[in-house]
Image (tube, rainbow, N blue to C red):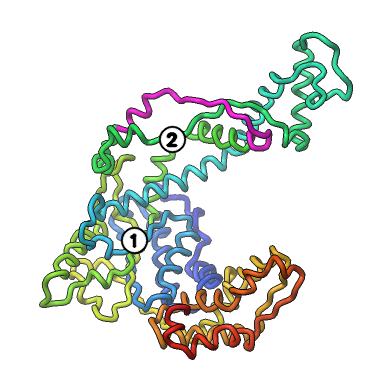
Amino acid sequence: MSKRDTSDGADLTPARIVSELDRHVVGQASAKRAVAVAIRNRWRRLQLEPELRREVQPRNILLIGSTGVGKTEIARRIADLVGAPFSKVEATKYTEVGYVGRDVESIVRDLLDMAIAMTRRTAEARVASRARERAEGRVLDALVTAWKPGDHDLDPFGEPAAGGAPTMRDLSAVRVRLRERLRSGALDDRRVEIDVREAKGQPLANIFGDPSMAQQGLDFGKLLERMQPPTTKRRSMTVREAIDTLAVEEAEGLVDGEAITADAIRLVEESGIVFLDEIDKVAGREGTTGADVSREGVQRDLLPLVEGTTVSTKHGPVRTDHILFIAAGAFHVAKPSDLLPELQGRFPIRVRLDDLTEEDFVRILEEPEGALTRQLVALLGTEGVKLSFTSDGIREIARVAVKANAAQENIGARRLATVIERVVEDLAFDAPARRGEKVAVDAAYVQERVGPLLEDEDLGAYVL
């Protein structure tokens, strides 16, 4: 039997994956290398003969590190990079007292919903040009129907048309000329009445559909809704709004819903990524009772998903054998060895992430493409304020963040957002009145705004 086409994803080497992650996440080289290899192994598995391909299990990863060191960001960025459906869940959610209506299998159902949305967007993007042409045709139909000789707003001929009812020849010429004007934007603000399909509500699903049955693949509410004929409503809107609205409607009609669902299920089974956060908080310590019994129950519920099972959904069964699970936790109190032995064995790759230093904070503020400093410069630039951050200003923000983390709860790089927002708070408020000003955030500027908060520990605990 032939192998898969090796050109699909072949250029996404581990080195390139790490390089892409470096654009967004500072440091943590070991964690980046681990996820890069895990992703590459997926591509390698797909090149194998089907018989062997089924036997190759994903190399699930356990990330160990304090909050705010980049665990979630690495997982999220890798999913974006490879276009994989991604779901982040807190393992502790399933230990909450009174938490009903959902179980751990809802992780896979939510992942499938995300994959269907992703697949639908991709499919609709492929037919976008055809959908827009159809939308233009419907708007033109409405315009031609509304046109009558002597209508100077719509008359495309530059002089009043002859009186009397328009002939077919007139309407054909009108349509050609109106299409030209429409595509040039001359009719964008012209109001037109069109029939728009009404969005389906949820009353039938709520009345007849039991959510728990829907999760198991029995959604009677959805079945009844399919039996209802689609309804439309006449709405008045501008030509620009009408084309945009109808293009979405036409795109939905041009794609095959069943094919989208099938592709989404395949995408989840082959490329899905689940990020299990706070896994350490469901690790029971040996010799303890009470809440730890509930935590161990969550681990036992998670185990089949990680080992590989079939989850029933309203869209069809989904296999979890090759979903990549990335678990993460601080493990300040519990240890990875406190997890169930069976669960430990399903996370063969363990990586400890480094705590962030002041130098790391400086790099986080300077290097990533979406750095907070660059975001603020762009945001305030929309108001005409020319904001800049000097090197000593960035270092002072980093120093303040490190000091605040040491004095309070260590929340890692998340502290930078709190500090930097405090630094520019007044400027962000006054920006509309300061159009054209140049503002340089240097060390003195930072100290003036957050220095007193650091000296007052009680106040700093609330503000920083």
Q: Could you say where residue 125 lies in the image, as x and y percent from the top left?
A: 56, 43
In which quadrant of the rendered view does residue 376 lie?
A: bottom right
> Secondary structure under badge 1?
strand
Horizontally, residue 295 falls left or right of residue 401, namely left
Residue 79, x across and y down, in percent: 45, 60
The magenta stretch spans residue 98: no
Residue 90 at x, y percent in the picture = 32, 64
Q: Any mark on residue 89, and which?
A: 1
Cα–Cα gap, marks 1 and 2: 28 Å
Query: Which mark, residue 118?
Result: none
Badge nearest the viewer, 1 or 2: 1
Mark nearer the N terminus (1 vs 2): 1
Q: Tags 1 and 2 in contact by the CB under 8 Å rule?
A: no
Span highlighted in magenta in the image: 221-243
Check the image and name the residue furthest to the top: 164
Q: Residue furthest bottom?
A: 455
Q: Residue 405 falls in which quadrant of the image? A: bottom left
Q: Answer above or below: position of 29 versus 131.
A: below
Q: Above or below — where is 295 with respect to 115?
A: below
Residue drawn 16% across the image and 70% down it: 292
- Neighbours of disc 1 within 10 Å: few (<14), some (14-19), many (20+): some
- The image position of residue 278, as x and y in percent, is 31, 69
Task: Say which residue appears at 33% left-offset and 40% top-offset.
Answer: 315
The residue lying toward the viewer, choosing from 317 and 228, is 228
386 relative to 359 in the view: left or right: right
> Which residue matches tag 2?
257
Is 231 inside the magenta-drawn segment?
yes
Dividing the picture into quadrants, the one containing residue 434 is bottom right
Identify which residue, 355 or 316, lies in the foreground.
Answer: 355
Residue at 51 percent across and 31 percent down: it is 253
Near mark 2 (Cα within 10 A), the count class, few <14, some 14-19 or many ≥20, is some
Amino acid type of the residue tagged 2 in the rendering? Gly
